[in-house]
Amino acid sequence: MKNFLIPIVFILVIIISCKKEKKSDELDTSKPLNFISLVASDSTILVNSTTKITATATGDELIYIWSCEWGTFIGSGSVVDWTVCHADTFNVKCEVKDKYNNSESKYAKIITE
Amino acid sequence: MQKSLQNRLFKIFLIALTLMCVSTEVYSQCCSSGSPAGASTFVGLLNKKTIRVISFYRYSFSDTYYNGTEKNKNYAILKNSSFNYAGITIGYGLSKRFSAEYEMGYFISKIQRYDLNPEYVLKGYGLSNGSISLKYGIFVKPEKNIEITTGAGVKFPFAVESQYVNNVLLPRDIQPSTGAFGVTTQIFLNKGFPLYSLRIFSLNKFEINGSNNDNYSYGNFLMNSLFISKKIAKDFYGFIQIRSDNRHSDNDVKGNVVNTGSEIIFVSPQLSYSIYEKWHLAILADLPVYKNYSGKQMTQKYSLAVSLTRDFNTCKAEIKK
């Protein structure tokens, strides 16, 4: 029995410590997060009118997080409308996150008159 | 001795009254549906070792734009706003002259409706702010039905981070919590006329709001109110409240925020029903009769509230109203 035990343990150690080598024909399908642009259809608008803001990004299972100190977002996702009830200059922020929790942010400046 | 005590009390009263009357410019928020005030007239000191629980619900609706004192035709895509708010106040009589109070509230919904096709609705919800305060009776004469009580306390937020829905930041006006701490002071004056089943009392509050994580502070708030209550039938009491709400301008990193601040005068009729002299059910309506807003703002049209009050009086003393 003892004669078999040592080789069995030796084999088990080799099996456990071996890493699976990546085969050349197995493709990495994950896409790196790339926040390409954040564009407002109108960067100067009248108070209480709306502007459409489009976020363009690539990556896996992206979510778009919108915020601004003032104003209201209408909709959600990669394209939203935005409006505000007083005149000033505003920075609308969009943060894009992928499923690996990577994130990038961009700002769109909008002036209301 | 009696004269010096009276002089001291009079000075304290004058100082408190002066503090209560501090009011400079008055502003409010441009799209706000307002903020809830309590819905009970059970104010003032509690008997020692008495626990008072007040639960209330308030609904408010706003759909009219004002600019100063003039109505403005609805010029924005925000059509109307409303909120449903539930709160609870727990008071405890620490001694004959000291009472403590804890209050908290929850926005069941805080809604904005936009004039789009189809209609677009945004909804905030959640725990709002709470407060803890102490009241002290500086002049209490139950045999003469007179009470002068002052109080001070701290307001605290249940949430310091702004609320997002579907990964979109909600507008400030429908955030459930201010996200900031504050301090409150109040003075309560009461005179009863038992011969006529009549009571006249005044409740005055001043709140100072701190800044939240966004470096935004809501305007300080001054409330002055006068109540007249009278027993109108067995177990039924009628109240009329005239109240002035003065809200100072909000502030952010740039300074005063435009289209914020207001001065509103309300008339609030209320009916209270006493159930076995233990439970008190009340309903009230807040009707604004004078409005003065800084800039263009959406204003409250009306507000309705209902409250249920119960005293747990371990000393078997009379319930104080």
Image (spheres, coloured by chain):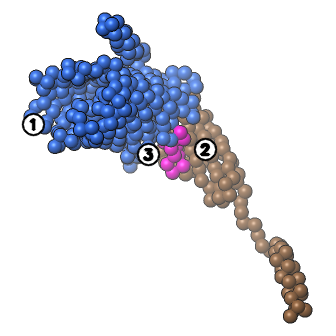
Callout 1 secondary element? loop
Viewer-proximal residue among A38 and A93: A93
Q: Colour of chain A?
A: brown
Q: Amino acid at mark 2?
A: Cys
Q: Is residue B316 left or right of residue B24?
A: left
Write down the residue under mark 3. B126
Q: Measured along the vertical axis of the image, is residue B98 above or below residue A16?
A: above
Chain at tag 3: B
Check residue A94 in the rendering and tell me which mark sits there, or answer none.
2
Q: Is residue B265 visible?
A: no
- Residue B225 at what x, y percent from top left? 29, 22
Q: Residue at x 43, y 34 (%)?
A: B131
User: For this view, does B6 lie left or right of residue A93?
Assistant: left
Label annotation for residue B223: none
Outermost residue toward the bottom? Answer: A1
Residue under the image location 62 percent in, 59 percent down: A61
Q: Looking at the image, which residue sits at the far front? A: B1
Question: Which numbered marker is on residue B234?
Answer: 1
- Can you say whether A27 is above or below B248 in the image? below
Span highlighted in magenta in the image = B160-171
Q: Residues within 10 Å of mark 1 (few under 14, many from 20)?
A: few
* Figure quadrant of the N terminus of chain A: bottom right
Q: Position of residue B42 (x, y in %)?
A: 27, 32
Image coordinates of residue B98 in percent, x first then y, are 36, 28
Judged from the image, the secondary structure of the residue bearing numbered disc 2 is strand
Q: Earlier in the sequence, mark 1 or mark 3?
A: 3
| Dots 2 and 1 on the same chain | no
